[in-house]
Image (cartoon, rainbow, N blue to C red):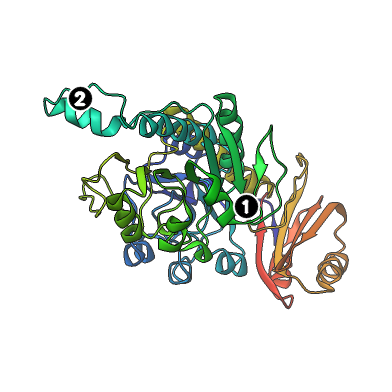
Amino acid sequence: MEQKLSYPKHKIKVLLLEGVHPRAQQLFADEGFDVELLASSLDEDELCKRIKGVSVIGIRSKTNITKKVLEHADRLIAIGAFCIGTNQIDLAEATKRGIVVFNAPYSNTRSVVELAIAEIVLLMRNLPDKIIGMHNGIWDKSATNSFEIRGKNLGIIGYGNIGSQLSVVAEAMGLQVYYYDLEEKLALGNATPCRSLKELLNVSDIVSIHVDGRKENTNMISDKEFKQMKDGVIFINLGRGHVVDIPALKKNIESGKVRGTAIDVYPKEPKSNNEPFESELKGSPNTILTPHIGGSTLEAQINIGAFVPTNLLKFINMGNTAGSVNFPELQLPVLEKGHRLLHVHQNAPGILAKINSILADKEINIIGQYLKTNETIGYVITDIYKNYPSNLIEKMRAIDGTIRVRVLF
């Protein structure tokens, strides 16, 4: 029996969580997929139940796709992180199972940067306390503890997409920028790299955190680091909640070491807007607490809502993996006549030869073939002309080291 068609699109189920922009739902629906959109995140047990039969899942930062979840994912081929970070996904396990992961590394960068700049101005002017005072009928017209940002030293921890753009905007506003990153990064403008975190903390009037969520960053800012900061420092965390020791921050706010703080991310956050927010930072002086909205602008959500599904659809429809965080990156040409076979396997020698041996045995000519590997897996795309026998895919799956075989069309 010869095969001609790929898996019907209306049977491909897409699950979108955490209220991702409706634009994402529309893009998948326009392709004919079965799409379900939920406003909240799901805990591990709930997700283990809901992920069965799902081929594509879209999440933001609150949903954790753990090894246990992936063990229950019987049809999952792709994960979309509608955010920058992917630490909430077990990437090693996803890769092991041949599940491609995409994120949105640039789409909300500007939104986070603008919030950081706004908070720096508010905190330097001691405005949070004055705003609360006005609502309580207190008229406190005073320049005490109110400063311009021009000429002050801004220390940026993490000089990635957000940190580097913050550097440019801050310098344009007259701040002197210093930065620290574990990797060597080219300075933009007149920014000064620091050789150590301590060096940055010693020199900064304002400290802003923009690091990723890897476990090694847990409590990277604790009592030791607060002691290394200037007295009266302004402290901002728009990165990840677990990178700051909250009790240590609270203590240093109360002592006056930290004169103002803005926190957008927390070690534990509500799963939805219906759950209460709890933090020992509530009620602290000159403190801005926001509900993880650094990237939550309409522009950013529209951009993310289009960017991530576009990459996912290119993978589903064409096999493209450009922009993936865990797969070898391949950008493929459009194939108008023929069939496209995708083979994901453990990175071991000789697999391409075995694939081609099977094709030769079936007297199948190859239109084009593409192979790329990373440390863990190999990814082979083979385009062929003729209809293929039904046992071809079975034979390709039987190759030692095979993780997944897909037929696109």
Q: Position of residue 393 (x, y in %)?
A: 70, 66
Q: Can residue 82 be seen in this view?
A: no
Q: What residue type is labelled 2?
A: Asp
Pinpoint residue 93: horizontal percent, then vertical percent: 56, 69
Residue 253, position as x, y percentages in the image? 31, 50
The residue wearing badge 1 is 181
| Dot 2 and dot 1 residues touching (CB under 8 Å) | no
User: 108 and 55: which one is in front?
Assistant: 108
Q: Where is residue 121 in the image (x, y as percent from the top left)?
A: 41, 29
Q: Quadrant of residue 160?
A: top right
Mark seen at residue 140:
2
User: Closer to the observer: label 2 or label 1?
Assistant: 2
**Residue at screen point 21% across, 46% down:** 274
Which residue sits at x=82%, y=69%?
A: 358
Answer with the quarter of the image where residue 392 lies: bottom right
Image side of residue 145 versus residue 308, left or right: left
Q: Alpha carbon of mark 2 to alpha carbon of mark 1: how far?
A: 40 Å
Nearer the N terminus, badge 2 or badge 1?
A: 2
What is the residue that sits farthest to the bottom in this orientation? Answer: 400
Decide if residue 130 is on the left or right side of residue 51: left
Mark 2 crowdedness (10 Å alpha carbons): few <14, some 14-19, many ≥20: few
Say if residue 4 shows up in the picture: yes
Disc 2, SS: loop
Q: Bin the neighbour count of mark 1 within 10 Å (Cα to Cα): few under 14, some 14-19, many 20 and up.
A: some
| Relative to 308, residue 277 above or below | below
* Residue closer to the observer: 393 or 239: 239
